[in-house]
Image (cartoon, rainbow, N blue to C red):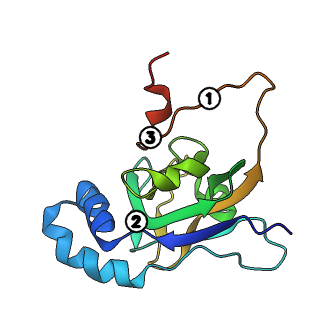
Amino acid sequence: MKRIAKFEKVSLGQFIEGWTDTFGAEEESAAREIYDQIKLPKRATSGSAGYDFFAPVSLTLAPGETVKVPTGIRVWMEPEWVLKCYPRSGLGFKFRLQLNNTVGIIDSDYYYSDNEGHIFSKITNDSKEGKTVEIKAGEGFMQGIFAEYGITLDDDATEIRNGGFGSTTKRTV
């Protein structure tokens, strides 16, 4: 097994910035307490491919509801690797819990972004059966799987990332 990455917490300041962007400034003091309780992603068993991301707070989503979750997590990884994020299998199967971008792609250079590579997850309860999803604080809600990737023979990308969602397509050609 190749060891190619390491999960870390973002700084407290970065977490509070992400938290207040989602939940409002009045929640800043609560964000400090939540930050202290954040658990780094981990595999449940030696045969697990996915690293479970744990909910920083309890989340309840009625059918059709969406929430953006600041995980407080960043990941350093070797170049030529990517972290692909999916909903936990059981939540997807039982409740049709979906990531809004279908699969979250965390590139290795995201770690160096101005936001410290803070990983967010925007999830929606897409239940067609009227089921409400309840995720307790500290419970796994998303899983990340590392994958190696290749590039084309004529690839000449030299730009350096500085930003998060959609930042790599904002380059001038």
Which of label 2 and label 3 is nearer to you? Answer: 3
Q: Which mark sits nearer the N-terminus, 2 or 3?
A: 2
**Viewer-nearest residue: 95 or 130:** 95
User: What amino acid type is highlighted by mark number 2?
Assistant: Thr
**Viewer-nearest residue: 45 or 60:** 45
Residue visible at 49% across and 27% down in the picture:
169
Badge 3 marks a residue whose secondary structure is loop
Residue visible at 50% across and 43% down in the picture:
100
Q: Is residue 81 visible?
A: yes
Badge 2 marks a residue whose secondary structure is strand
Report whether 33 appears left or right of 41.
left
User: What amino acid type is highlighted by mark number 3?
Assistant: Phe
Q: Is residue 130 visible?
A: no
Residue picked out by circle 3:
165
Cα gap from disc 2 to disc 1, whole angstroms:
42 Å
Report whether 80 appears left or right of 39.
right
Quick check: 74 above or below 149? Answer: below
**Label 2 with label 3: CB-CB less than 8 Å:** no
Residue picked out by circle 2:
60
Residue visible at 43% across and 46% down in the picture:
64
Cα gap from disc 1 to disc 3, whole angstroms:
18 Å
View extreme (left): residue:
26
Identify the disc placed on residue 145.
none
Which of label 1 and label 3 is nearer to you? Answer: 1
Residue picked out by circle 1:
157
